[in-house]
């Protein structure tokens, strides 16, 4: 990978031992978090305390300048296993920092990285929109935002938000990224009633109206259109797939605990289901591990964009199928009683069912077929 230069001196802040403790704390508070009006506020205090928010910055354990993708995917999986809503928000933070790593100027990186290190800034990335789509307009005050974004995960917790919209000005034309200061967004611009989901309630993915926000030049990230640059745009799917797999692992653990509580682990039919669930999850781990290795190798070498996108797409759809299989087998194992409120499985089922609904699942499968029709000998290494 091309190493980014920075003038800031970084200290190694992440504590793996503390992070493992935080995962246990997040797991234990997951049910309460679902009903907390502040969402996972406490969870992100814990993640800040163990240095997780800066884990991908230069000099840190998962420095983006180094081939660390397999371990990053494992970390995302582990967070998803603890709480899918926390995993979703954290994945958005990582995604935004990666785009900064790729496209920011040195001055911008120093500014935004310093915010993470010195002010514990949490980043988010919000691209989804409805009829009142976000765009940039020229006014007497300069360039302003007009319109809204939907599904803004963690918006009451995020300090800096990457938002996208159409721009047409003297020097910019197209789909533009900008990173804005959420402290300048009034609370009345956040529509909490817009978020009435089946699952992932704790992610607080509200609708936000950004109209009237005046942009500074330093808040523009990259040139118009660069957000959709390949292979980064499609290959990034492996990160949310890792969080998904963590949710499926949580379902397996919840199923085992439930069966133990009833003394039913000796039932041969339950054992068959557990065998199938475990095998499916191990397959998912292998998909993630290989996806991470390919990502690091092929980004470094260059010239492998089509292969990287195809393998990322396969990883995404196969992990989706694995998650659906695990949910089905668990459902048949625990029955209606296992989904009652005193058990965590109902919440995890709701969250994972909702979170799996990512954009264009059928088109993703068609892209895989198109790739192999053109390159039937791919991945024969």
Image (cartoon, rainbow, N blue to C red):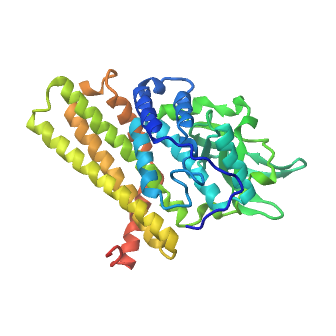
Occupied quadrant, residue 255: top left
Question: Is residue 149 shown to the viewer in this render?
Answer: yes
Q: From the viewer's side, name the closer residue of 192 and 289.
A: 289
Q: Is residue 41 left or right of residue 344?
A: right
Indicate left or right for 254 with 24 as reference: left
Given residues 319 and 97, the one toward you in this image is: 97
Q: How many marks?
A: 0
Residue at x 65%, y 48% (from the top left corner): 162
Residue at 68%, 40% in the rendered image: 118
Name the residue located 36 percent from the left edge and 74 percent from the top edge. Answer: 372
Does residue 32 appear left or right of residue 232 in this picture? left
Near-viewer residue (196 or 372):
372
The N terminus - image quarter: bottom right
Q: Position of residue 61 (x, y in %)?
A: 51, 51
Q: Residue at x 65, y 40 (%)?
A: 121
Q: Is residue 160 visible?
A: no
């Amino acid at each position: 990978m091309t190493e980014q230069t920075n003038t800031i001196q970084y200290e190694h802040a992440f504590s793996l031992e503390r992070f493992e403790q935080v995962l246990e704390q997040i797991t234990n508070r997951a049910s309460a978090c679902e009903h907390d009006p502040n969402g996972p506020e406490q969870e992100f205090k814990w993640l800040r305390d163990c240095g997780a928010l800066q884990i991908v910055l230069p000099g840190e354990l998962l420095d983006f300048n180094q081939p660390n993708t397999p371990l990053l995917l494992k970390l995302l999986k582990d967070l998803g296993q603890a709480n899918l809503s926390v995993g979703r928000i954290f994945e958005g933070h990582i995604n935004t920092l990666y785009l900064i790593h790729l496209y920011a100027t040195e001055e911008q990186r120093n500014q935004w990285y310093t915010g993470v290190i010195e002010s514990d800034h949490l980043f988010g990335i919000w691209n989804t929109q409805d009829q009142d789509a976000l765009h940039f307009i020229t006014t007497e005050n300069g360039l302003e935002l007009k319109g809204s974004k939907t599904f803004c995960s963690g918006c009451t917790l995020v300090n800096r938000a990457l938002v996208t919209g159409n721009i047409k000005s003297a020097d910019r034309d197209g789909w533009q990224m900008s990173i804005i200061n959420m402290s300048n967004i009034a609370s009345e611009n956040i529509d909490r009633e817009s978020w009435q989901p089946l699952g992932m309630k704790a992610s607080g993915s509200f609708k936000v109206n950004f109209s009237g926000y005046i942009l500074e030049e330093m808040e523009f990230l990259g040139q118009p259109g660069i957000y959709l640059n390949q292979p980064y745009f499609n290959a990034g799917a492996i990160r949310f797939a890792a969080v998904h797999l963590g949710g499926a692992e949580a379902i397996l653990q919840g199923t085992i605990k439930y069966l133990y509580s009833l003394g039913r682990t000796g039932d041969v039919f339950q054992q068959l289901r557990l065998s199938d669930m475990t095998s499916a999850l191990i397959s998912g781990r292998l998909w993630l591990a290989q996806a991470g290795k390919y990502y690091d190798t092929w980004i470094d070498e260059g010239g492998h964009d089509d292969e990287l996108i195809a393998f990322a797409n396969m990883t995404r759809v196969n992990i989706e199928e694995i998650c659906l299989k695990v949910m089905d087998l668990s459902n048949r194992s625990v029955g209606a009683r296992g989904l009652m409120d005193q058990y965590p499985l109902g919440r995890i089922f709701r969250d994972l069912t909702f979170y799996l609904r990512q954009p264009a699942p059928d088109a993703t499968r068609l892209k895989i077929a198109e790739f192999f029709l053109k390159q039937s000998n791919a991945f024969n290494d």
